[in-house]
């Protein structure tokens, strides 16, 4: 909402020298957010001039200019720019005559843009200023010719300051109006709020209107709403006044044009401008009908199925049965509360006007405005609630202005239908406001604050009975009244207190471990990404099943991308997509990871088929259980992708490309972060390279896989041949890990190290051999790692030699070589028993 300060000052006292910033600061105190300040961006000298003579001079470019002599100061006086009283000015417009009063921008003036004015040589003359158009002054969009003051009904002395004369010295503040503060979409509402903030005296503009007298049925109006929405009539108030003998050709006064322009509304004609002016002033939208084009009385009803109507913007619209229409004997003449119709609009030939102000159901208006994409100024106010008690005053105010500015005569009587229910009293118990806001308010403070907004307050035994004013539909309960007291007395009185978190709460174990895992991977050089949780059927089929068996997927009802209409079963497709985009932009070395949910529906089950419960009551436990059962399992997975060089080429160091070893290193980082022990064994996955895929287990449970992407799939995604991939069920890893970790003391006694080479069949995994050696060696074995995998001369065909580095240590003594050898041989013996391993001599 834009509020011109001169207009605001008519209804609330502004201290001389008050700036837009001062008004903004005051309104912020009562909760109205500041947005901007608007001015005409003009700088003097801009004066009234009189055209003394001109000579038309055709030019070689086909254009004809006028070389004008313009008086810009009274005879014998110096012009405002310090020059002569008569200036020579070149002008391209041809809509003015000798003797016309015009607006002259003298050298040194600045027009909006900014566009500074200076004497300049053009068309063979020195043009000493410029004769301005309405658009150049910021008054309107007219730019075909210069502004003749006679068209505005102005005949001011030559040399008069045109900025002040035309009201162009005004400024407007802009505020943000939230949906619950619809009253602030008016000068009346903002003036009242400024009075609340500063204590300045408020003058209600409604009191300026002379109410109608005589008959209340001066014009036939019938409200026939047979299908109210939610049982609420579409129109509860409908007021009319008739003004006869208006002159639609009269100019709109300059002060009204300036105020409308600052408020963000362009001037159209004097009759339309008056209705817009009163809407801004009172917050009550107004509509004017050409009375002579009406046929019979007015009936307000719901639209018939398929009914059509042409609105003021010239578009024919097919109406919905919920739309409210204003009709006469021929049919719809207005889309109630949104926009009028073309057949009865006021125009240049209008002589008699029917002025209408109504109060419409906010829900109905909001639906109609959105349905027809008509966010009009009227609809914007009706959606938020309009004071139902000012319709009569509003039509009287319009009638008064049409009499004063358009020369009409208002009929004494008017029609008024009002079925708006009276506001119900709200009980505000003693101490309730203090208990809600958290600070102490006296009963007198509460009473005075609510009386200030116009509430009818009655003292009762338990507190106050408050009837909110009609212009505040947002005040519906005692909580809203408490908030209003706090707002008017001042938010600065409410202390800022930092809440203290209750003890014993915080992150759960799962949350802590997930965060620790992400922090660990990021600290190791990985970059966390977030990809869309949507996938194609092919992605889910390839990555959602290790062995290629059919999988079930959840289809999205309204997919954002029709190529990916399913919820993902794996994080890998999203990581591949992220890698592909980065590689296409020249980022060749990538180390990415993601922690997110995947969706694993059970085959044959239907999910999401239950109706969502209503939002104004808590669902029963049975309904909540059914809703939970209708959601597919959504475990959190961790996925990682590494591509490119993990060690870049440098002096003395060849480049090291990513591979399965880097994928397994990610697994080790996860082990460190979660405290899990993940067994790595030879595995297989339809999307992974055969022989370069590891199965990840905790005990007997498979929790994921790691390895290298199948080269054919990498090529399809425009990725290098080798792409390291990890995906595991992080929720399962956390659940299968001991909740408490036992820290082992760091050994201070010397360690004994030995190597062990075992020959095993090629199909036996090295991890299985290491596990057997670890178990057989017993407690003295501190660490075991594989250091060599040899296949060649000296080793039987179909077999391989695995060499392990063993480290032994005792807590209470220094081990002898014999003790270490005995433990090593015990490990070898168990490997022989389980796996057929033999010691390589």
Image (tube, grey):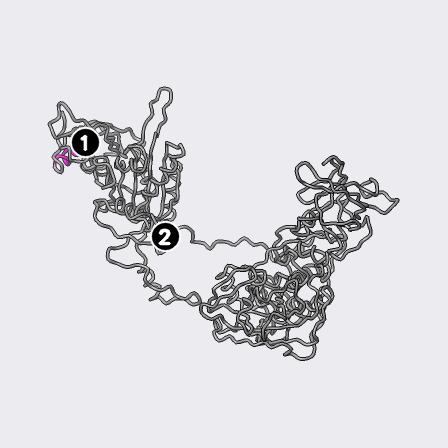
**Residue 82 horizontal side relative to residue 482, left or right:** right
Q: Residue at x 49, y 61 (%)?
A: 372
Q: Is residue 391 visible?
A: yes
Q: Camera-side residue: 670 or 575?
A: 575
Q: Is residue 28 visible?
A: no
Q: Is residue 90 one of those drawn in magenta?
A: no
Q: Nearer the viewer, residue 146 or 814?
A: 146
Q: Where's residue 429, x and y in %?
A: 58, 71
Q: Which SS does the magenta portion mostly show? A: helix
Residue to which mark 2 is pinned: 559
The residue indicated by pointer 1 is 824
The answer to whether residue 697 is left or right of residue 295 is: left
Query: As displayed, is residue 335 above or below residue 676?
Result: below
Of the two numbered discs 1 and 2 in the rendering, the one whose residue sits closer to the viewer: 2
Q: Earlier in the sequence, mark 1 or mark 2?
A: 2
- In the image, residue 631 above or below residue 774: below
State the extent of the magenta-drawn residues as a range. 826-832
In the rendered image, the vertical position of residue 341 relative to residue 840, given as above or below:
below
Across and down, in percent, residue 439 comes to: 60, 61
- The quadrant of the image that shows the N terminus is bottom right
């Amino acid at each position: 909402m834009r509020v011109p300060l001169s207009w605001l000052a008519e209804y609330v006292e502004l201290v001389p020298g008050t700036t837009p910033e001062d008004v903004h600061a005051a309104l912020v105190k009562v909760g109205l957010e500041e947005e901007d300040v608007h001015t005409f961006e003009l700088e003097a000298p801009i004066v009234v001039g009189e055209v003394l003579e001109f000579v038309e001079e055709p030019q070689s470019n086909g254009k004809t200019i006028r070389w004008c002599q313009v008086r810009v100061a009274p005879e014998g006086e110096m012009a405002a720019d310090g020059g002569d009283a008569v200036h020579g000015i070149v002008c391209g417009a041809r809509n003015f005559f000798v003797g016309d009063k015009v607006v002259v921008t003298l050298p040194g003036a600045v027009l909006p843009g900014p566009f500074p004015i200076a004497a300049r040589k053009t068309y063979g003359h020195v043009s000493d200023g410029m004769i301005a158009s309405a658009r150049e002054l910021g008054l309107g969009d007219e730019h075909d010719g210069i502004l003749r003051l006679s068209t505005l009904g102005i005949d001011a002395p030559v040399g008069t300051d045109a900025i002040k004369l035309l009201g162009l010295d005004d400024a407007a503040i802009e505020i943000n109006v939230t949906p619950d503060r619809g009253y602030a979409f008016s000068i009346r509402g903002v003036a009242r709020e400024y009075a609340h903030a500063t204590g300045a005296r408020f003058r209600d503009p409604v009191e300026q209107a002379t109410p109608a007298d005589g008959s209340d049925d001066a014009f036939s109006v019938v409200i026939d709403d047979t299908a109210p929405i939610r049982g609420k009539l579409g129109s509860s108030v409908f007021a009319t006044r008739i003004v006869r003998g208006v002159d639609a050709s009269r100019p709109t006064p300059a002060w009204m044009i300036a105020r409308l322009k600052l408020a963000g509304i362009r001037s159209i004609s004097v009759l339309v401008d008056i209705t817009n002016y009163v809407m801004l002033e009172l917050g009550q939208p107004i509509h004017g009908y050409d009375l002579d084009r009406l046929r019979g009385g007015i009936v307000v009803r719901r639209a018939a199925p398929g009914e059509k109507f042409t609105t003021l913007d010239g578009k024919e619209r097919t109406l919905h049965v919920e739309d409210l229409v204003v009709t006469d004997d021929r049919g719809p003449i207005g889309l109630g509360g949104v926009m009028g119709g073309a057949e009865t609009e006021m125009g240049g030939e209008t002589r008699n006007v029917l002025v209408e102000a109504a109060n419409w159901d906010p829900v109905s208006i909001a639906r109609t405005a959105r349905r027809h994409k008509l966010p009009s100024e009227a609809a914007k106010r009706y959606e938020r609630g309009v004071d139902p008690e000012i319709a009569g005053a509003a039509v009287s105010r319009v009638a008064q202005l049409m009499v004063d500015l358009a020369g009409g005569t208002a009929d004494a009587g008017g029609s008024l239908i009002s079925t708006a229910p009276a506001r119900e009293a709200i009980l505000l118990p003693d101490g309730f406001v203090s208990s809600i806001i958290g600070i102490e308010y006296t009963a007198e403070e509460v009473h005075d604050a609510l009386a200030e907004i116009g509430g009818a307050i009655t003292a009762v035994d338990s507190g106050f009975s408050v009837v909110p004013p009609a212009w505040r539909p947002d005040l519906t309960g005692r909580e809203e009244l408490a908030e209003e007291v706090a707002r008017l007395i001042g938010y600065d009185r409410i202390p800022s207190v930092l809440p203290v978190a209750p003890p014993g709460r915080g992150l759960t174990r799962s949350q802590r471990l997930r965060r620790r895992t992400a922090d660990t991977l990021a600290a190791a050089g990985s970059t966390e990404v977030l990809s869309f949780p949507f996938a194609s059927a092919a992605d889910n089929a390839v990555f959602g099943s290790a062995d290629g068996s059919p999988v079930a997927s959840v289809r999205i009802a309204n997919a954002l991308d029709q190529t990916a209409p399913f919820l993902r079963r794996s994080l890998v497709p999203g990581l591949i997509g992220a890698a592909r985009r980065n590689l296409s932009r020249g980022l060749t070395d990538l180390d990415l990871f993601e922690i997110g949910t995947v969706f694993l529906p059970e085959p044959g089950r239907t999910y999401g088929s239950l109706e969502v419960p209503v939002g104004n009551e808590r669902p029963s436990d049975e309904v909540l259980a059914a809703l939970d059962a209708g959601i597919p399992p959504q475990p959190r997975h961790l996925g990682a992708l590494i591509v490119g060089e993990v060690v870049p080429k440098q002096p003395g160091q060849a480049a090291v490309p990513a591979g399965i070893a880097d994928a397994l290193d990610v697994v080790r980082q996860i082990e460190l972060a979660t405290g899990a022990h993940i067994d790595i064994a030879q595995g297989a996955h339809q999307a992974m390279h055969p022989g370069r895929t590891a199965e990840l287990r905790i005990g007997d449970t498979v929790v994921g896989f790691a390895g290298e992407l199948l080269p054919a799939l990498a090529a399809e995604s425009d990725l290098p041949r080798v792409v390291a991939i990890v995906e595991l069920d992080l929720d399962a890893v956390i659940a299968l890990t001991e909740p408490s970790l036992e820290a082992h003391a760091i050994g201070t006694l010397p360690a004994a190290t030995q190597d062990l080479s075992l020959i095993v069949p090629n199909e036996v995994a090295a991890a299985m051999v290491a596990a057997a050696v670890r178990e057989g060696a017993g407690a003295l074995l501190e660490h075991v790692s594989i250091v060599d995998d040899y296949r060649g001369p000296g080793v039987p065909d179909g077999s391989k030699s695995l060499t392990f580095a063993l480290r032994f240590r005792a807590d209470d003594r220094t081990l002898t070589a014999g003790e270490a050898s005995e433990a090593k041989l015990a490990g070898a013996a168990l490997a022989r028993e389980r796996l057929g391993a033999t010691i390589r001599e």
